[in-house]
Amino acid sequence: MSDYKTDFLHEAKEFVEIMNQCFLRLEKGEKSAIDEIFRAAHTLKGMAGFMGYKNLENLCHKLESVLGKFRDREVGEDIVDILLLSVDKISEMLCKIENDNCDEVDCRLIFEKLYEIEEERVEKEVENANLKIEIKIAENCQMMGVRGLLILETLRNICEIKATEPEENKIEDGCAFFTVYARGNVKAVDEALSGVSEIEKYSIRELNEDKKFLEISEMENRTELREEIREEKRDFISRKSEDVRVDVRVLDTIMNLIGELVIIKSRLLQIASKHNIQELSEAINIMDKSITNLQDEVMKVRMVKVERIFNKFPRMVRDLAKRLGKRVEFTMEGLDTELDRTVLDKMSDPIMHLLRNAVDHGIESPKERIMIGKSEIGKIKLSARREKSNVVIEIEDDGKGLDLEEIRKKAIEKGLISENSNLSEEEIKMLIFIPGFSTKDVPTEISGRGIGMDVVKTTVEKLGGSLKIVSEKGKGTRIKINLPPTVAIIKSLLVLVNDQVYAIPISNVVEAVYVDENNWKKIHGSPFLFVRDNLIPAFKISEIFGCEDGSGRKVGIIVEKESEKFALIVDSILDQQEIVVKPLTGFLSKVKGFSGVTILGDGTVVPIIDISSLLGGDKFG
Protein backbone atom coordinates (compact mmCIF):
# COMPACT_ATOMS: atom_id res chain seq x y z
CA MET A 1 0.00 0.00 0.00
CA SER A 2 2.94 2.32 0.52
CA ASP A 3 3.14 2.68 -3.28
CA TYR A 4 -0.25 4.39 -3.23
CA LYS A 5 0.17 6.51 -0.10
CA THR A 6 1.38 9.68 -1.87
CA ASP A 7 -1.43 9.52 -4.42
CA PHE A 8 -3.97 8.77 -1.68
CA LEU A 9 -2.88 11.82 0.35
CA HIS A 10 -2.93 14.08 -2.70
CA GLU A 11 -6.47 13.06 -3.66
CA ALA A 12 -7.68 13.04 -0.05
CA LYS A 13 -6.55 16.64 0.42
CA GLU A 14 -8.43 17.62 -2.75
CA PHE A 15 -11.61 16.05 -1.31
CA VAL A 16 -11.08 17.97 1.94
CA GLU A 17 -10.92 21.23 -0.05
CA ILE A 18 -14.12 20.25 -1.90
CA MET A 19 -15.91 19.58 1.40
CA ASN A 20 -14.72 22.88 2.89
CA GLN A 21 -16.04 24.82 -0.11
CA CYS A 22 -19.32 22.89 -0.29
CA PHE A 23 -20.12 23.32 3.41
CA LEU A 24 -19.81 27.09 2.96
CA ARG A 25 -22.16 26.88 -0.03
CA LEU A 26 -24.55 24.77 2.04
CA GLU A 27 -24.52 27.43 4.74
CA LYS A 28 -25.70 29.93 2.12
CA GLY A 29 -28.64 27.68 1.22
CA GLU A 30 -27.26 25.78 -1.82
CA LYS A 31 -28.83 22.34 -1.33
CA SER A 32 -26.97 20.94 -4.34
CA ALA A 33 -23.78 21.16 -2.27
CA ILE A 34 -24.96 18.19 -0.14
CA ASP A 35 -24.67 15.82 -3.10
CA GLU A 36 -21.09 16.99 -3.77
CA ILE A 37 -20.18 16.54 -0.09
CA PHE A 38 -21.74 13.07 -0.16
CA ARG A 39 -19.67 12.09 -3.18
CA ALA A 40 -16.47 13.45 -1.64
CA ALA A 41 -17.08 11.79 1.75
CA HIS A 42 -18.13 8.50 0.14
CA THR A 43 -15.11 8.35 -2.19
CA LEU A 44 -12.75 9.31 0.62
CA LYS A 45 -14.31 6.62 2.83
CA GLY A 46 -13.76 4.00 0.12
CA MET A 47 -10.16 5.10 -0.43
CA ALA A 48 -9.48 5.06 3.33
CA GLY A 49 -10.95 1.55 3.59
CA PHE A 50 -8.82 0.35 0.70
CA MET A 51 -5.70 1.83 2.33
CA GLY A 52 -6.59 0.35 5.73
CA TYR A 53 -7.19 3.62 7.63
CA LYS A 54 -10.21 2.54 9.69
CA ASN A 55 -10.57 5.67 11.87
CA LEU A 56 -10.73 7.87 8.78
CA GLU A 57 -13.17 5.45 7.15
CA ASN A 58 -15.45 5.49 10.24
CA LEU A 59 -15.44 9.31 10.46
CA CYS A 60 -16.36 9.64 6.78
CA HIS A 61 -19.10 7.06 7.28
CA LYS A 62 -20.49 9.03 10.22
CA LEU A 63 -20.35 12.24 8.20
CA GLU A 64 -22.37 10.54 5.44
CA SER A 65 -24.93 9.40 8.01
CA VAL A 66 -25.37 12.89 9.49
CA LEU A 67 -25.64 14.53 6.06
CA GLY A 68 -28.53 12.22 5.26
CA LYS A 69 -30.58 14.04 7.89
CA PHE A 70 -30.24 17.38 6.13
CA ARG A 71 -31.13 16.57 2.53
CA ASP A 72 -34.54 18.20 2.90
CA ARG A 73 -33.92 20.49 5.86
CA GLU A 74 -32.33 23.86 6.48
CA VAL A 75 -28.75 23.81 7.74
CA GLY A 76 -27.92 26.54 10.24
CA GLU A 77 -24.59 28.17 11.02
CA ASP A 78 -24.13 26.15 14.23
CA ILE A 79 -24.55 22.88 12.34
CA VAL A 80 -22.07 23.97 9.66
CA ASP A 81 -19.58 24.82 12.43
CA ILE A 82 -19.68 21.21 13.65
CA LEU A 83 -19.52 19.78 10.13
CA LEU A 84 -16.48 21.96 9.37
CA LEU A 85 -14.86 20.73 12.60
CA SER A 86 -15.27 17.18 11.28
CA VAL A 87 -13.44 18.23 8.09
CA ASP A 88 -10.67 19.70 10.26
CA LYS A 89 -10.44 16.34 12.04
CA ILE A 90 -10.11 14.60 8.67
CA SER A 91 -7.27 17.01 7.81
CA GLU A 92 -5.62 16.18 11.15
CA MET A 93 -5.86 12.48 10.31
CA LEU A 94 -4.30 13.04 6.89
CA CYS A 95 -1.43 14.92 8.54
CA LYS A 96 -0.96 12.00 10.94
CA ILE A 97 -0.99 9.54 8.03
CA GLU A 98 1.57 11.64 6.14
CA ASN A 99 3.95 11.91 9.09
CA ASP A 100 3.38 8.70 11.10
CA ASN A 101 1.60 6.42 8.58
CA CYS A 102 -1.38 5.94 10.93
CA ASP A 103 -4.73 7.68 11.54
CA GLU A 104 -4.83 7.32 15.34
CA VAL A 105 -6.42 10.65 16.24
CA ASP A 106 -8.80 11.24 19.16
CA CYS A 107 -12.23 11.68 17.53
CA ARG A 108 -14.46 11.21 20.58
CA LEU A 109 -15.48 14.87 20.85
CA ILE A 110 -16.36 15.29 17.18
CA PHE A 111 -18.31 12.00 17.18
CA GLU A 112 -20.29 13.24 20.21
CA LYS A 113 -21.10 16.49 18.42
CA LEU A 114 -22.13 14.63 15.26
CA TYR A 115 -24.36 12.30 17.31
CA GLU A 116 -25.92 15.32 19.03
CA ILE A 117 -26.91 17.13 15.84
CA GLU A 118 -28.11 13.82 14.41
CA GLU A 119 -30.39 13.13 17.36
CA GLU A 120 -31.75 16.62 17.94
CA ARG A 121 -33.36 16.66 14.49
CA VAL A 122 -35.98 14.07 15.47
CA GLU A 123 -36.08 14.28 19.26
CA LYS A 124 -39.80 15.14 19.50
CA GLU A 125 -40.88 12.49 17.02
CA VAL A 126 -39.22 9.52 18.70
CA GLU A 127 -40.05 9.94 22.39
CA ASN A 128 -41.37 6.37 22.64
CA ALA A 129 -38.81 4.67 20.37
CA ASN A 130 -36.00 2.55 21.74
CA LEU A 131 -34.35 1.67 18.41
CA LYS A 132 -32.82 3.77 15.68
CA ILE A 133 -32.36 1.84 12.45
CA GLU A 134 -30.35 3.33 9.56
CA ILE A 135 -30.73 1.65 6.18
CA LYS A 136 -28.91 2.21 2.89
CA ILE A 137 -30.38 0.56 -0.20
CA ALA A 138 -27.97 -0.64 -2.90
CA GLU A 139 -27.45 1.95 -5.64
CA ASN A 140 -28.12 -0.62 -8.40
CA CYS A 141 -31.61 -1.36 -7.02
CA GLN A 142 -34.05 -1.01 -9.93
CA MET A 143 -37.16 -0.13 -7.86
CA MET A 144 -35.80 1.75 -4.88
CA GLY A 145 -39.20 3.07 -3.71
CA VAL A 146 -40.79 -0.38 -3.72
CA ARG A 147 -37.79 -1.87 -1.91
CA GLY A 148 -38.03 0.84 0.75
CA LEU A 149 -41.73 0.08 1.40
CA LEU A 150 -41.00 -3.67 1.59
CA ILE A 151 -38.32 -2.99 4.23
CA LEU A 152 -40.83 -0.92 6.26
CA GLU A 153 -43.44 -3.73 6.00
CA THR A 154 -40.83 -6.27 7.17
CA LEU A 155 -40.07 -4.09 10.21
CA ARG A 156 -43.79 -3.56 11.00
CA ASN A 157 -44.21 -7.33 11.30
CA ILE A 158 -41.72 -7.49 14.19
CA CYS A 159 -41.76 -4.02 15.84
CA GLU A 160 -43.73 -0.78 16.16
CA ILE A 161 -42.53 2.01 13.84
CA LYS A 162 -42.74 5.42 15.57
CA ALA A 163 -41.25 7.68 12.89
CA THR A 164 -39.18 7.68 9.72
CA GLU A 165 -36.77 10.20 8.31
CA PRO A 166 -37.52 11.32 5.66
CA GLU A 167 -41.29 10.84 5.71
CA GLU A 168 -42.70 7.57 4.40
CA ASN A 169 -44.09 9.12 1.19
CA LYS A 170 -40.57 10.27 0.26
CA ILE A 171 -39.23 6.78 0.91
CA GLU A 172 -41.94 5.51 -1.45
CA ASP A 173 -40.78 7.98 -4.12
CA GLY A 174 -37.31 6.41 -3.98
CA CYS A 175 -34.81 7.09 -1.22
CA ALA A 176 -31.42 5.37 -1.03
CA PHE A 177 -30.85 6.21 2.64
CA PHE A 178 -33.45 6.48 5.41
CA THR A 179 -33.82 6.14 9.18
CA VAL A 180 -36.52 4.29 11.12
CA TYR A 181 -37.31 4.98 14.79
CA ALA A 182 -39.08 1.98 16.31
CA ARG A 183 -39.98 0.14 19.50
CA GLY A 184 -38.99 -3.49 19.45
CA ASN A 185 -36.37 -6.17 20.02
CA VAL A 186 -32.84 -5.59 18.68
CA LYS A 187 -32.17 -9.23 17.87
CA ALA A 188 -35.44 -9.68 15.98
CA VAL A 189 -34.81 -6.55 13.88
CA ASP A 190 -31.24 -7.64 13.15
CA GLU A 191 -32.36 -11.10 11.99
CA ALA A 192 -35.15 -9.68 9.84
CA LEU A 193 -32.99 -7.12 8.04
CA SER A 194 -30.14 -9.57 7.45
CA GLY A 195 -32.49 -11.61 5.26
CA VAL A 196 -33.62 -8.71 3.05
CA SER A 197 -31.93 -8.39 -0.35
CA GLU A 198 -30.70 -5.18 -1.99
CA ILE A 199 -29.73 -3.63 1.36
CA GLU A 200 -26.18 -2.37 1.03
CA LYS A 201 -25.79 -1.73 4.76
CA TYR A 202 -27.75 -1.05 7.92
CA SER A 203 -27.04 -0.19 11.55
CA ILE A 204 -29.14 -0.54 14.70
CA ARG A 205 -28.72 1.74 17.71
CA GLU A 206 -30.48 1.28 21.06
CA LEU A 207 -31.54 4.07 23.41
CA ASN A 208 -29.52 4.03 26.65
CA GLU A 209 -30.27 5.50 30.10
CA ASP A 210 -28.94 8.92 29.01
CA LYS A 211 -31.48 9.00 26.19
CA LYS A 212 -28.76 8.53 23.57
CA PHE A 213 -28.80 5.99 20.79
CA LEU A 214 -25.71 3.76 20.98
CA GLU A 215 -24.64 1.58 18.05
CA ILE A 216 -24.98 -2.08 19.01
CA SER A 217 -25.33 -3.81 15.66
CA GLU A 218 -24.16 -3.09 12.13
CA MET A 219 -24.25 -5.24 9.03
CA GLU A 220 -23.15 -4.64 5.47
CA ASN A 221 -24.05 -6.66 2.42
CA ARG A 222 -20.64 -8.29 2.07
CA THR A 223 -21.05 -9.23 -1.60
CA GLU A 224 -21.93 -5.69 -2.60
CA LEU A 225 -19.33 -4.25 -0.21
CA ARG A 226 -16.54 -6.34 -1.69
CA GLU A 227 -17.61 -5.26 -5.16
CA GLU A 228 -17.67 -1.60 -4.01
CA ILE A 229 -14.15 -1.90 -2.57
CA ARG A 230 -12.94 -3.57 -5.76
CA GLU A 231 -14.51 -0.73 -7.77
CA GLU A 232 -12.86 1.90 -5.54
CA LYS A 233 -9.55 0.08 -5.95
CA ARG A 234 -9.93 -0.05 -9.74
CA ASP A 235 -10.81 3.67 -9.86
CA PHE A 236 -7.97 4.60 -7.55
CA ILE A 237 -5.38 2.56 -9.47
CA SER A 238 -6.65 3.80 -12.85
CA ARG A 239 -6.40 7.40 -11.66
CA LYS A 240 -2.88 6.67 -10.48
CA SER A 241 -1.89 5.26 -13.89
CA GLU A 242 -3.46 8.13 -15.84
CA ASP A 243 -1.91 10.95 -13.81
CA VAL A 244 1.80 11.65 -13.57
CA ARG A 245 2.68 13.85 -10.59
CA VAL A 246 5.88 15.81 -11.12
CA ASP A 247 7.79 17.52 -8.33
CA VAL A 248 7.97 21.26 -9.04
CA ARG A 249 11.73 21.07 -8.37
CA VAL A 250 12.06 18.77 -11.38
CA LEU A 251 10.26 21.38 -13.51
CA ASP A 252 12.61 24.05 -12.13
CA THR A 253 15.61 21.93 -13.17
CA ILE A 254 14.17 21.41 -16.67
CA MET A 255 13.50 25.14 -16.94
CA ASN A 256 17.09 25.92 -15.94
CA LEU A 257 18.38 23.50 -18.58
CA ILE A 258 16.18 25.18 -21.21
CA GLY A 259 17.64 28.48 -20.03
CA GLU A 260 21.13 27.14 -20.65
CA LEU A 261 20.03 26.09 -24.15
CA VAL A 262 18.79 29.63 -24.78
CA ILE A 263 22.21 31.01 -23.74
CA ILE A 264 24.05 28.48 -25.92
CA LYS A 265 21.75 29.32 -28.85
CA SER A 266 22.66 33.02 -28.49
CA ARG A 267 26.35 32.13 -28.42
CA LEU A 268 26.07 30.02 -31.57
CA LEU A 269 24.21 32.84 -33.35
CA GLN A 270 27.07 35.21 -32.51
CA ILE A 271 29.64 32.74 -33.87
CA ALA A 272 27.65 32.17 -37.06
CA SER A 273 27.25 35.92 -37.57
CA LYS A 274 30.91 36.67 -36.82
CA HIS A 275 32.28 34.04 -39.22
CA ASN A 276 29.42 34.33 -41.75
CA ILE A 277 28.58 30.59 -41.68
CA GLN A 278 25.26 30.31 -43.51
CA GLU A 279 24.68 26.58 -42.83
CA LEU A 280 25.22 27.08 -39.08
CA SER A 281 22.77 29.98 -39.02
CA GLU A 282 20.10 27.86 -40.73
CA ALA A 283 20.65 24.97 -38.30
CA ILE A 284 20.44 27.36 -35.32
CA ASN A 285 17.17 28.83 -36.61
CA ILE A 286 15.66 25.31 -36.76
CA MET A 287 17.02 24.58 -33.27
CA ASP A 288 15.60 27.90 -32.06
CA LYS A 289 12.06 26.81 -33.02
CA SER A 290 12.47 23.53 -31.14
CA ILE A 291 13.81 25.29 -28.03
CA THR A 292 10.96 27.80 -28.15
CA ASN A 293 8.36 25.01 -28.48
CA LEU A 294 10.00 23.06 -25.64
CA GLN A 295 10.02 26.19 -23.48
CA ASP A 296 6.33 26.85 -24.21
CA GLU A 297 5.35 23.28 -23.33
CA VAL A 298 7.25 23.33 -20.02
CA MET A 299 5.69 26.70 -19.23
CA LYS A 300 2.23 25.19 -19.82
CA VAL A 301 3.04 22.43 -17.34
CA ARG A 302 4.19 25.00 -14.78
CA MET A 303 1.08 27.15 -15.18
CA VAL A 304 -1.77 26.42 -12.76
CA LYS A 305 -5.09 28.12 -12.08
CA VAL A 306 -5.19 30.52 -9.15
CA GLU A 307 -8.15 28.59 -7.72
CA ARG A 308 -5.53 26.11 -6.52
CA ILE A 309 -4.75 28.43 -3.60
CA PHE A 310 -7.80 30.73 -3.70
CA ASN A 311 -10.16 27.91 -2.67
CA LYS A 312 -8.70 27.68 0.82
CA PHE A 313 -9.47 31.33 1.64
CA PRO A 314 -13.32 31.30 1.97
CA ARG A 315 -13.12 29.01 5.01
CA MET A 316 -10.39 31.15 6.58
CA VAL A 317 -12.35 34.38 6.06
CA ARG A 318 -15.54 32.83 7.45
CA ASP A 319 -13.86 31.48 10.59
CA LEU A 320 -11.95 34.71 11.28
CA ALA A 321 -15.03 36.90 10.77
CA LYS A 322 -17.05 34.76 13.14
CA ARG A 323 -14.27 34.83 15.70
CA LEU A 324 -14.17 38.65 15.55
CA GLY A 325 -17.94 38.99 15.69
CA LYS A 326 -18.18 40.38 12.17
CA ARG A 327 -20.38 39.49 9.22
CA VAL A 328 -18.58 39.19 5.89
CA GLU A 329 -19.68 38.31 2.38
CA PHE A 330 -16.61 36.94 0.62
CA THR A 331 -16.53 36.56 -3.16
CA MET A 332 -13.87 35.43 -5.64
CA GLU A 333 -13.47 36.14 -9.36
CA GLY A 334 -11.11 35.02 -12.12
CA LEU A 335 -10.38 31.57 -10.68
CA ASP A 336 -9.37 30.32 -14.16
CA THR A 337 -6.52 32.84 -14.39
CA GLU A 338 -3.20 30.99 -14.69
CA LEU A 339 0.11 31.71 -12.96
CA ASP A 340 3.46 29.98 -12.74
CA ARG A 341 3.18 27.46 -9.89
CA THR A 342 6.28 28.86 -8.18
CA VAL A 343 4.83 32.38 -8.24
CA LEU A 344 1.44 31.17 -7.02
CA ASP A 345 2.86 29.12 -4.14
CA LYS A 346 4.93 32.07 -2.94
CA MET A 347 1.89 34.36 -3.09
CA SER A 348 -0.27 32.14 -0.87
CA ASP A 349 0.87 33.61 2.46
CA PRO A 350 0.86 37.27 1.31
CA ILE A 351 -2.72 36.95 0.02
CA MET A 352 -3.77 35.24 3.25
CA HIS A 353 -2.24 38.07 5.30
CA LEU A 354 -3.97 40.76 3.21
CA LEU A 355 -7.33 38.99 3.62
CA ARG A 356 -6.84 38.68 7.38
CA ASN A 357 -6.05 42.40 7.49
CA ALA A 358 -9.19 43.16 5.48
CA VAL A 359 -11.33 41.26 8.00
CA ASP A 360 -9.52 42.52 11.12
CA HIS A 361 -8.55 46.12 10.20
CA GLY A 362 -10.86 46.88 7.30
CA ILE A 363 -14.37 45.58 7.96
CA GLU A 364 -16.18 47.27 10.84
CA SER A 365 -18.37 45.44 13.37
CA PRO A 366 -22.08 45.08 12.41
CA LYS A 367 -23.03 47.70 15.01
CA GLU A 368 -20.47 50.22 13.68
CA ARG A 369 -21.55 49.64 10.07
CA ILE A 370 -25.23 50.21 10.87
CA MET A 371 -24.39 53.43 12.78
CA ILE A 372 -22.62 54.91 9.73
CA GLY A 373 -25.33 53.83 7.29
CA LYS A 374 -23.69 50.73 5.83
CA SER A 375 -25.09 47.22 5.54
CA GLU A 376 -24.16 45.15 8.60
CA ILE A 377 -22.59 42.63 6.22
CA GLY A 378 -19.15 43.72 5.01
CA LYS A 379 -17.93 42.76 1.55
CA ILE A 380 -14.49 41.42 0.63
CA LYS A 381 -13.57 40.44 -2.91
CA LEU A 382 -10.53 38.52 -4.10
CA SER A 383 -10.01 38.59 -7.86
CA ALA A 384 -7.42 37.68 -10.48
CA ARG A 385 -7.16 38.69 -14.14
CA ARG A 386 -4.71 38.99 -17.01
CA GLU A 387 -3.62 42.54 -17.80
CA LYS A 388 -1.30 42.85 -20.79
CA SER A 389 1.44 40.28 -20.19
CA ASN A 390 1.03 40.30 -16.39
CA VAL A 391 -1.42 38.87 -13.87
CA VAL A 392 -3.22 41.22 -11.49
CA ILE A 393 -4.50 40.03 -8.10
CA GLU A 394 -6.75 42.39 -6.14
CA ILE A 395 -8.06 42.31 -2.58
CA GLU A 396 -10.91 44.78 -2.10
CA ASP A 397 -13.13 45.56 0.90
CA ASP A 398 -15.86 48.10 1.69
CA GLY A 399 -14.57 48.74 5.21
CA LYS A 400 -13.20 51.78 6.99
CA GLY A 401 -10.36 52.49 4.54
CA LEU A 402 -6.96 53.93 5.42
CA ASP A 403 -6.72 56.91 7.77
CA LEU A 404 -3.69 58.68 6.29
CA GLU A 405 -3.37 61.11 9.19
CA GLU A 406 -3.34 58.27 11.73
CA ILE A 407 -0.79 56.34 9.65
CA ARG A 408 1.50 59.38 9.50
CA LYS A 409 1.10 60.00 13.24
CA LYS A 410 1.92 56.38 14.13
CA ALA A 411 4.95 56.38 11.81
CA ILE A 412 6.31 59.49 13.59
CA GLU A 413 5.65 57.92 17.03
CA LYS A 414 7.56 54.79 16.04
CA GLY A 415 10.45 56.85 14.63
CA LEU A 416 9.94 55.54 11.13
CA ILE A 417 9.76 59.06 9.67
CA SER A 418 10.59 62.53 11.00
CA GLU A 419 7.96 65.14 11.90
CA ASN A 420 9.01 67.46 9.07
CA SER A 421 8.70 64.72 6.42
CA ASN A 422 6.77 65.96 3.42
CA LEU A 423 5.22 62.78 2.04
CA SER A 424 2.66 62.43 -0.72
CA GLU A 425 -0.55 60.45 -0.14
CA GLU A 426 0.90 57.48 -2.07
CA GLU A 427 4.04 57.50 0.10
CA ILE A 428 1.97 57.64 3.30
CA LYS A 429 -0.05 54.61 2.15
CA MET A 430 3.14 52.66 1.48
CA LEU A 431 4.26 53.27 5.10
CA ILE A 432 2.09 50.32 6.19
CA PHE A 433 4.60 48.03 4.43
CA ILE A 434 7.54 49.18 6.58
CA PRO A 435 8.73 46.48 9.05
CA GLY A 436 7.47 47.19 12.57
CA PHE A 437 4.61 49.46 11.53
CA SER A 438 1.12 48.93 12.96
CA THR A 439 -1.76 51.25 13.83
CA LYS A 440 -2.81 49.01 16.73
CA ASP A 441 -1.67 49.98 20.22
CA VAL A 442 -2.13 46.48 21.65
CA PRO A 443 -1.10 43.52 19.49
CA THR A 444 -3.35 40.48 19.24
CA GLU A 445 -2.72 36.96 17.97
CA ILE A 446 -4.23 38.09 14.65
CA SER A 447 -2.44 41.39 14.05
CA GLY A 448 -0.74 44.42 15.56
CA ARG A 449 2.88 43.27 15.75
CA GLY A 450 4.00 45.13 12.64
CA ILE A 451 5.04 41.99 10.83
CA GLY A 452 3.39 40.59 7.74
CA MET A 453 2.80 43.58 5.49
CA ASP A 454 6.53 44.06 4.95
CA VAL A 455 6.74 40.37 4.02
CA VAL A 456 3.92 40.93 1.51
CA LYS A 457 5.83 43.75 -0.19
CA THR A 458 9.17 41.91 -0.11
CA THR A 459 7.65 38.75 -1.62
CA VAL A 460 5.88 40.64 -4.40
CA GLU A 461 9.02 42.58 -5.33
CA LYS A 462 11.20 39.45 -5.31
CA LEU A 463 8.80 37.95 -7.83
CA GLY A 464 9.27 41.00 -10.05
CA GLY A 465 5.84 42.40 -9.21
CA SER A 466 4.50 45.63 -7.76
CA LEU A 467 1.92 46.83 -5.23
CA LYS A 468 -0.55 49.69 -5.34
CA ILE A 469 -3.07 50.80 -2.71
CA VAL A 470 -6.29 52.63 -3.54
CA SER A 471 -8.19 53.68 -0.42
CA GLU A 472 -10.73 56.22 0.76
CA LYS A 473 -11.43 56.77 4.44
CA GLY A 474 -14.84 55.35 5.35
CA LYS A 475 -15.33 53.77 1.90
CA GLY A 476 -12.88 50.88 1.72
CA THR A 477 -9.50 49.72 0.43
CA ARG A 478 -8.28 48.00 -2.73
CA ILE A 479 -4.79 46.50 -2.93
CA LYS A 480 -3.61 45.73 -6.45
CA ILE A 481 -0.76 43.26 -6.95
CA ASN A 482 0.83 43.15 -10.40
CA LEU A 483 2.78 39.95 -11.07
CA PRO A 484 4.68 38.49 -14.03
CA PRO A 485 3.09 35.18 -15.15
CA THR A 486 6.47 33.45 -14.71
CA VAL A 487 9.87 34.28 -13.26
CA ALA A 488 12.03 31.87 -15.25
CA ILE A 489 12.48 33.34 -18.75
CA ILE A 490 11.41 36.86 -19.68
CA LYS A 491 11.57 39.15 -22.71
CA SER A 492 13.85 42.10 -22.14
CA LEU A 493 15.40 45.16 -23.71
CA LEU A 494 19.22 45.21 -23.57
CA VAL A 495 20.55 48.73 -23.14
CA LEU A 496 24.08 50.19 -22.94
CA VAL A 497 25.31 52.76 -20.41
CA ASN A 498 28.97 53.58 -21.05
CA ASP A 499 30.47 50.06 -21.33
CA GLN A 500 27.92 48.31 -19.10
CA VAL A 501 24.93 46.37 -20.46
CA TYR A 502 21.64 46.33 -18.50
CA ALA A 503 18.42 44.40 -19.12
CA ILE A 504 15.01 46.04 -18.69
CA PRO A 505 11.95 43.69 -18.65
CA ILE A 506 9.78 44.36 -21.70
CA SER A 507 6.66 44.15 -19.49
CA ASN A 508 7.70 47.50 -17.95
CA VAL A 509 8.63 49.24 -21.22
CA VAL A 510 6.11 51.52 -22.96
CA GLU A 511 8.26 53.07 -25.69
CA ALA A 512 11.70 54.53 -26.48
CA VAL A 513 12.52 58.07 -27.71
CA TYR A 514 15.69 59.92 -28.62
CA VAL A 515 16.69 62.65 -26.17
CA ASP A 516 17.52 66.07 -27.60
CA GLU A 517 17.28 69.74 -26.64
CA ASN A 518 13.66 69.88 -27.78
CA ASN A 519 12.32 67.27 -25.35
CA TRP A 520 14.84 67.49 -22.47
CA LYS A 521 13.51 69.91 -19.84
CA LYS A 522 14.60 70.91 -16.35
CA ILE A 523 11.95 72.24 -13.96
CA HIS A 524 13.10 73.48 -10.54
CA GLY A 525 16.29 71.50 -11.04
CA SER A 526 14.53 68.18 -11.82
CA PRO A 527 14.90 66.65 -15.30
CA PHE A 528 11.87 65.74 -17.42
CA LEU A 529 11.25 64.37 -20.89
CA PHE A 530 8.57 66.19 -22.86
CA VAL A 531 6.75 63.46 -24.82
CA ARG A 532 3.51 64.20 -26.71
CA ASP A 533 2.60 67.17 -24.50
CA ASN A 534 3.32 65.18 -21.30
CA LEU A 535 6.15 65.81 -18.82
CA ILE A 536 7.71 62.52 -17.74
CA PRO A 537 10.19 62.45 -14.80
CA ALA A 538 13.62 61.42 -16.14
CA PHE A 539 16.44 59.51 -14.41
CA LYS A 540 19.91 58.85 -15.78
CA ILE A 541 20.97 55.24 -15.19
CA SER A 542 24.58 56.42 -14.94
CA GLU A 543 23.69 58.73 -12.03
CA ILE A 544 21.56 56.11 -10.24
CA PHE A 545 24.34 53.52 -10.27
CA GLY A 546 27.22 55.99 -9.94
CA CYS A 547 29.00 55.23 -13.22
CA GLU A 548 30.36 57.47 -15.96
CA ASP A 549 28.09 58.71 -18.70
CA GLY A 550 28.80 57.58 -22.24
CA SER A 551 29.21 60.02 -25.13
CA GLY A 552 26.83 60.63 -28.01
CA ARG A 553 23.09 60.90 -28.38
CA LYS A 554 20.98 59.50 -25.53
CA VAL A 555 17.84 57.36 -25.58
CA GLY A 556 14.94 57.66 -23.13
CA ILE A 557 13.31 54.32 -22.23
CA ILE A 558 9.77 55.13 -21.08
CA VAL A 559 8.75 52.64 -18.39
CA GLU A 560 5.52 52.27 -16.43
CA LYS A 561 5.24 51.64 -12.71
CA GLU A 562 1.83 51.48 -11.03
CA SER A 563 0.21 53.46 -13.88
CA GLU A 564 2.89 56.20 -13.65
CA LYS A 565 5.44 56.77 -16.42
CA PHE A 566 9.16 57.43 -15.95
CA ALA A 567 12.06 57.85 -18.37
CA LEU A 568 15.32 55.95 -17.90
CA ILE A 569 18.13 57.65 -19.84
CA VAL A 570 20.64 55.28 -21.48
CA ASP A 571 23.32 55.58 -24.20
CA SER A 572 21.75 53.16 -26.67
CA ILE A 573 19.54 50.12 -27.21
CA LEU A 574 21.48 46.98 -28.13
CA ASP A 575 18.86 44.30 -28.66
CA GLN A 576 15.53 42.80 -27.61
CA GLN A 577 15.72 39.14 -26.59
CA GLU A 578 14.53 36.48 -24.19
CA ILE A 579 16.76 36.13 -21.16
CA VAL A 580 17.07 33.57 -18.40
CA VAL A 581 16.63 35.12 -14.94
CA LYS A 582 19.27 34.05 -12.43
CA PRO A 583 18.18 35.23 -8.94
CA LEU A 584 20.60 37.08 -6.68
CA THR A 585 21.61 35.10 -3.60
CA GLY A 586 23.42 35.78 -0.34
CA PHE A 587 24.19 39.40 0.50
CA LEU A 588 23.51 40.38 -3.14
CA SER A 589 19.79 39.58 -2.63
CA LYS A 590 19.54 42.75 -0.51
CA VAL A 591 20.77 45.02 -3.30
CA LYS A 592 18.01 47.38 -4.39
CA GLY A 593 17.32 48.08 -8.05
CA PHE A 594 18.04 44.60 -9.44
CA SER A 595 15.77 41.56 -9.69
CA GLY A 596 18.59 39.25 -10.77
CA VAL A 597 21.14 38.78 -13.53
CA THR A 598 21.32 37.03 -16.86
CA ILE A 599 24.17 35.60 -18.93
CA LEU A 600 24.47 36.47 -22.62
CA GLY A 601 25.73 34.17 -25.30
CA ASP A 602 29.28 35.58 -25.08
CA GLY A 603 29.37 34.99 -21.32
CA THR A 604 28.68 38.60 -20.31
CA VAL A 605 26.86 38.91 -16.97
CA VAL A 606 24.07 41.48 -17.28
CA PRO A 607 22.13 42.95 -14.33
CA ILE A 608 18.32 42.94 -14.71
CA ILE A 609 16.82 46.25 -13.60
CA ASP A 610 13.92 46.01 -11.15
CA ILE A 611 11.76 49.02 -12.01
CA SER A 612 9.65 48.67 -8.85
CA SER A 613 12.49 48.97 -6.32
CA LEU A 614 14.62 51.26 -8.53
CA LEU A 615 11.89 53.89 -8.71
CA GLY A 616 10.00 52.83 -5.59
CA GLY A 617 9.19 54.80 -2.49
CA ASP A 618 11.68 53.02 -0.24
CA LYS A 619 13.29 56.22 1.02
CA PHE A 620 11.29 58.07 3.64
CA GLY A 621 12.22 60.83 6.06
Image (tube, grey):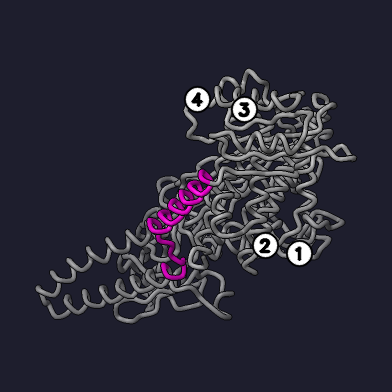
Q: Position of residue 523 (x, y in %)?
A: 54, 56
The picture quadrant where one finds residue 431 is: bottom right
Q: Residue at x 22, y 63 (%)?
A: 289
Disc 4 to disc 2, C-alpha distance: 63 Å
Q: Which mark is residue 151?
A: 3
Residue type indicated by callout 3:
Ile
Q: Earlier in the sequence, mark 4 or mark 2?
A: 4
Residue position marked by numbered label 4 in the rendering: 143
Residue 379 visible? The answer is no
Residue 139 on the magenta segment: no
Tell me the element at label 4.
Answer: loop
Residue type indicated by callout 4:
Met
Residue position marked by numbered label 1 in the rendering: 436
Give whichever of 170, 9 is nearer the camera: 170
Q: Earlier in the sequence, mark 2 or mark 3?
A: 3
Residue 53 visible? The answer is yes
Residue position marked by numbered label 2 in the rendering: 454
Disc 4 to disc 1, C-alpha distance: 68 Å
